[in-house]
Amino acid sequence: MFPKLPVRIAVLCLVAGAFAVTFFFHHPKAALAADSTAPAYTTNGELLPPTNYREWIYLTSGVDMSYSPKAPGMQSHSSFDNVFVNPAAYRSFLATGTWPDKTVMVLEAREARNKGSINQDGHFQAGGVMDLEVHVKDEARFPGKWAFFSFNPAGGNGTLFPQTANCYSCHTAHAAVDTTFVQFYPTLLPIAQSKGTLSAEFLKDEAAAGK
Amino acid sequence: MFPKLPVRIAVLCLVAGAFAVTFFFHHPKAALAADSTAPAYTTNGELLPPTNYREWIYLTSGVDMSYSPKAPGMQSHSSFDNVFVNPAAYRSFLATGTWPDKTVMVLEAREARNKGSINQDGHFQAGGVMDLEVHVKDEARFPGKWAFFSFNPAGGNGTLFPQTANCYSCHTAHAAVDTTFVQFYPTLLPIAQSKGTLSAEFLKDEAAAGK
């Protein structure tokens, strides 16, 4: 697990508007998996883990991303975040520049290792999933249409982040498209630009940054 | 483009055993694209660019990876490498732990940007494709069964690396499975381990490193 879990969860929550799942290769029996890419829930509101998100559409990776300046001594380990989206939502985005109902975005974190095999510099991905979060669009179910869920990579269902969590307010205030951080998805940002679906909040941020 | 292209090409060639393609969103008319995921060639031996590799199976990303120690002043820009493989080859690997004939692996490089939007630390991916390489398994066509091709991201077909290029010898000497760097693909390495398909050369490297 991450050495500083609250910080890590906050970062993941903010990073990409994505997120969740038991890593099926390592935990085949960990949970009753959803059969398709549509979000499915338990009776008490937990999200069932999508089992095959590594076969969905890849959107981007980041390394050690943070929305706060780096504090001295805060970064003891490096990690990658990989973001995936269900294929139907991706195809809809290509056509419209925004996300349809039932979009599921998954963010997984993996160790960024420096030395290993013949690698001498930079970082590669190694080992199992360290953190998993899911960002789900389910318009009839959630007040703001979207919700974040956090999964324990060791298995089990996803726990809902309450609507008061700062991931919601930050995504609303800064995300490029429909509360998702499309500004960090290099193949989707040009589509949103051409379709005119960038959020007013994002355009305001960019204008303030002189872009 | 990369500031030090020969170095960059060498690194890409080594990094992942992957590689190539015109980025279809940006260059829809750049080349006569292959219709399927199978490799296709021009009459003079160039490789046609796979057009939709971003919808293939994602394997991993690295950042600033190098198989040589970092030299002072050598790294003026950071970049990510993303690796994709055609879905049929991926499914075969899940079943067998190695690659079938007609496997196509694509490596694309994108800028690793530090500041942008609300990001303050670490790196995210931004902009178009900076470099593209493809690693193709075509048993009847290439002496060592595999070949590397380099693409100009601005468009056009892929140029074959001659069999004397050091990517071939390095992949043969150090790659974990069938001349591909599965040691850097975190979801595939456990499969190769369980299927017993790790190369003798890789196991020798690991033993020498005390693993």
Image (spheres, coloured by chain):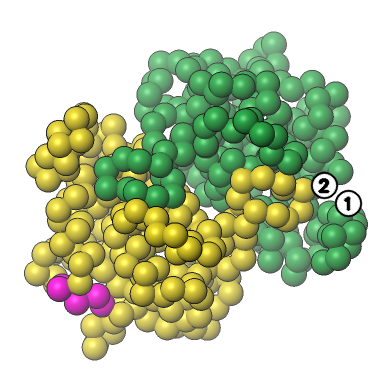
Chain colours: A yellow, B green
Q: CA distance from mark 1 to mark 2?
A: 6 Å
Q: Secondary structure at mark 2?
A: helix
- The residue most toward the front is A72
* Amino acid type at mark 1: Glu
Q: Residues within 10 Å of mark 1 (few under 14, many from 20)?
A: some
Subunit of label 1: B
Q: Hey, which quadrant is residue B107 in on the image?
A: top right
A28, above or below B106, in the image: below
Q: Nearer the viewer, residue B153 or B75?
A: B75
Q: Are marks 1 and 2 in contact (CB under 8 Å)?
A: yes
Residue at the spot 85% in from the left edge and 60% down from the top edge: B209
Main SS class of the magenta portion in the image = loop
* Amino acid type at mark 2: His
Q: Nearer the viewer, residue B6 or B174?
A: B6
Q: Which residue is mark 1?
A: B201
- Would residue A64 be seen by someone viewing this image from the given angle? yes
Left or right: where B38 falls relative to A178: right
Q: Position of residue A140 (x, y in %)?
A: 11, 68
Q: Nearer the viewer, residue A54 or A122?
A: A122
Q: Position of residue A111 (x, y in %)?
A: 56, 62
Residue at the spot 57% in from the left edge and 57% down from the top edge: A112
Residue at the spot 19% in from the left edge and 77% down from the top edge: A162
Q: Position of residue A33 (x, y in %)?
A: 42, 76
- The magenta region covers A160-164
Q: Secondary structure at mark 1?
A: helix
- Would residue A35 be seen by someone viewing this image from the given angle? no
Q: Hey, which quadrant is residue A93 in on the image?
A: top left
Left or right: where B185 falls relative to B22: right
Q: Which residue is mark 2?
A: B174
Subunit of label 2: B
